[in-house]
Amino acid sequence: GAGVSQTPSNKVTEKGKYVELRCDPISGHTALYWYRQSLGQGPEFLIYFQGTGAADDSGLPNDRFFAVRPEGSVSTLKIQRTERGDSAVYLCASSPGGGAALGANVLTFGAGSRLTVL
Amino acid sequence: SQELEQSPQSLIVQEGKNLTINCTSSKTLYGLYWYKQKYGEGLIFLMMLQKGGEEKSHEKITAKLDEKKQQSSLHITASQPSHAGIYLCGALDMDTGRRALTFGSGTRLQVQP
C-alpha cells in the first residue's frame, strides 16, 4: 500500500479480554516495528521483524504480549488478559530494512491503534 | 542503553517567532532522526543527520548535529500554526546493535496566531 495501515484505529475492551491489533506495512518493506506510546511520552520499542522472523523482541513487557508476521507482510500484535496499564497508542512502522545503512532505518509510521482497557 | 533527553518539554510561541528544540544523547550518535507528530496521527519523518557538524534544512526547519555527535538541535524560523505538534528525536543504539530507533519523550510545540 501507499502507507502503513493500522486497524482498528480505536479499541475499547474490558480488563482480562484478548485483543489483536493489525498492521499492514508499505509494500516491499522488509522491516516492521511495533511501538507503544503513552500520553506525554515518546514511542517505546516493543518488537522488530526482519522478514517473517522476530529479530528483536526485547521490548515486549511480558509474556501477555506476542506478535506475528507469518508471510513477511502483515503483522498482528496480540495482547492476552489485558490490564488497564496496557492502555496506550500502539504504533506500527516499516522501513526498507536489509542493511545497516542509516537510510534503511528511516521508519514510516502508521496512525496508530488507540487501546483503552476499562 | 541509550537515552535521549529533549528540551524543552513544551513550548508556546507567537506566530512568526523563531525557536529551538534540543536533543541530547547519553551516547555518541551514529545517526539522529527527527520526527513530527500531530495529535491522533503517526510520526512523520523530517530529517536524518549522520555526520558531526552536519546541517540539513527543509522549508523553515533546520536541524544540526554537533561535532561531538551527542547533541542535535532543531530550529524553526518564523514559526507558523502549521508547525504545531510534537517533535521527537530518535537514534539507533549502535552498542546494542538494536535496529529499532530509541526516541526521546518529545517537545510539544504550540504556535499562537
Image (tube, rainbow, N blue to C red):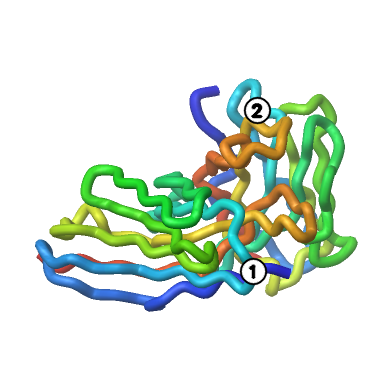
Q: Secondary structure at mark 2?
A: loop
Where is residue A105? Give x, y as percent: 62, 41
Q: Is residue B71 visible?
A: yes
Q: CA distance from mark 1 to mark 2?
A: 29 Å
In the visual, does B7 lie left or right of B57? Answer: right
**Camera-side residue of A94 and B50:** B50
Q: Report in which chain the residue with disc 2 lies.
A: A
Where is residue A30? Give x, y as percent: 71, 29
Q: Report in which chain the residue with disc 1 lies.
A: B
From the viewer's perspective, is residue B13 above or below residue A71? below
Q: Are marks 1 and 2 in contact (CB under 8 Å)?
A: no
Image point (76%, 53%), residue name: B98
Where is residue B107? Give x, y as percent: 40, 69
User: Mark 2 sits on what residue?
Assistant: A29
User: Mark 1 sits on what residue?
Assistant: B27
Which of discs 1 and 2 lies nearer the camera? The answer is 1
From the viewer's perspective, is residue A73 above or below residue A90? above
Q: Amino acid at mark 2?
A: His
Quadrant (top left, top right, bottom left, bottom right) of the C terminus of chain A: bottom right
Quadrant (top left, top right, bottom left, bottom right) of the N terminus of chain A: top right
Q: Residues within 10 Å of mark 1 (few under 14, many from 20)?
A: some
Q: Is residue B42 visible?
A: no
Labels 1 and 2 in the same subunit = no
In the visual, does B37 lie left or right of B93? Answer: left
In the visual, does A16 lie left or right of B4? Answer: right
Image point (78%, 27%), residue name: A72
Residue B74: name its quadrant.
Answer: bottom left
Q: Amino acid at mark 1?
A: Lys
**Camera-side residue of B24 and A107:** B24
Image point (59%, 28%), residue name: A26
Q: Residues within 10 Å of mark 2 (few under 14, many from 20)?
A: many
